[in-house]
Image: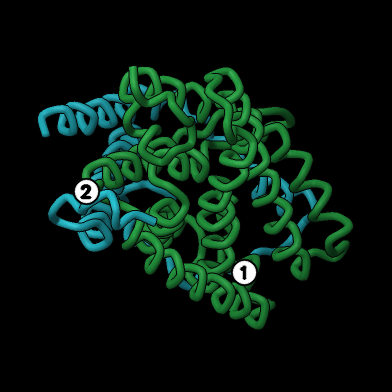
Amino acid sequence: MKKYFAIIALIMVFLVILIPFASSNPDGLEKVATTFGVEEHAPFWNGLMFDYSVGAIGNPYISTLIAGVFGTLIVLLATFLLGTAITPKKTRAVSDAH
Amino acid sequence: MHIPDGLLVNDPALAAVMWIVAIPILAWSWKKAKTTYFHSTAALLAISSAFVFAAQMINFPIIFGTSGHLVGGTFLAVLLGPYAAILSMTIVLLMQALFFADGGILAFGANVFNMAIIGGLSFFLIKLLTRKSKSSGRFASSVFIVSWLSVVLGALACGLEISPAFAGGMMVTVPSMLFFHAIIGLGEGAITTVLISSVHRLQPAVIGSLTLLKGKEKP
């Protein structure tokens, strides 16, 4: 179990170090949309932290970092629940496989 | 490659079709995933998905002022098998759409298809390419090719789905999406191959348990 917490800590370190280096250029899809002048309609749902930033925090690095840490933890929790739902609690006999 | 609602809102029928395509595949994955594992993989599943979320935030620059990021579908597929990969990538996409408006709600079905389903199913292609081979070189090159292809196929599907919003239609969207993602896919291939090769070296049982590499799991 300790091993898993170490990996979670590593993912956080990964975010702390790499967020400042993340490219803010449009991604492939955004580039295609802007190049060909598509008028994108305003989204009707902006999420809680639109574009990975926390509105109340001025510093863009801290803002994105908080969004990233929050997102990582919420994905961790949701997929852990998924994992417990789809995998057996006790080790199943191998013969029962596939 | 996350389609925002703004690009699909003109075409609610298409958005609905992609939901209708995605839902039975998710139900099938759920059913199959429940019979895949012999012991709990909740921790591995959660950690690899959390990593994919974090990695998707880090865009790397390519050319013409454009960037891309890891999608991670093939990465999850190799670690978790196809069914759990489809489900966990769907959860990553769901959290991105709900909390960060990265990918739309209407467009969610399309995004699940392009990234979660194509990514998860790429498992079978790797299995096909590495079958009966014990070579880690062949395994690594299959991972590279298939992760590249998963991004390019996702971009092809995405180009078709967004084409009604463009005056030029699919003659414009498909080639331009393929062009950028053929390059982004090289990043996907490189990152996925390095990650999977490291896991394979450090924790061979994780990959061996899915019988991707026959006979390699025992040291």
Number of residues whose C-alpha sits closer than 10 Å to that of mark 2, classed few (under 14), some (14–19) or many (20 or more): some
Image side of residue B45 versus residue B7, left or right? left
- Residue labelled with disc 2: B39
Q: CA distance from mark 1 to mark 2?
A: 47 Å
- The answer to which of B175 and A87 lies nearer the viewer is A87
**Which chain is the one coloured green?**
B
- Tell which subunit mark 2 falls on: B
The percent coordinates of residue B132 (x first, y second) are 57, 32
The percent coordinates of residue A49 (x first, y second) are 34, 55
Q: What residue is shown at x 52% (from left), y 25% (from top)? A: B193
- Residue labelled with disc 1: A41
Pair 1/2: label in front = 2
Q: Is residue A57 visible?
A: no
Judging from the image, what secondary structure is the residue with disc 2 in? loop
- Tell which subunit mark 1 falls on: A
**Position above or below: B1 against B30:** above
Q: What residue is shown at x 52% (from left), y 37% (from top)? A: B70
Q: Quadrant of the C terminus of chain A?
A: bottom left
The shade of chain A is: cyan
The percent coordinates of residue B7 (x first, y second) are 65, 65
Which amino acid type is shown beneath numbered disc 2? His
Q: What residue is shown at x 47% (from left), y 55% (from top)? A: B102
Please identify the quarter of the rendering in which residue A42 is found. Answer: bottom right
**Residue at the outermost left position:** A2
Which amino acid type is shown beneath numbered disc 1? His
- The answer to which of B44 and B139 lies nearer the viewer is B139
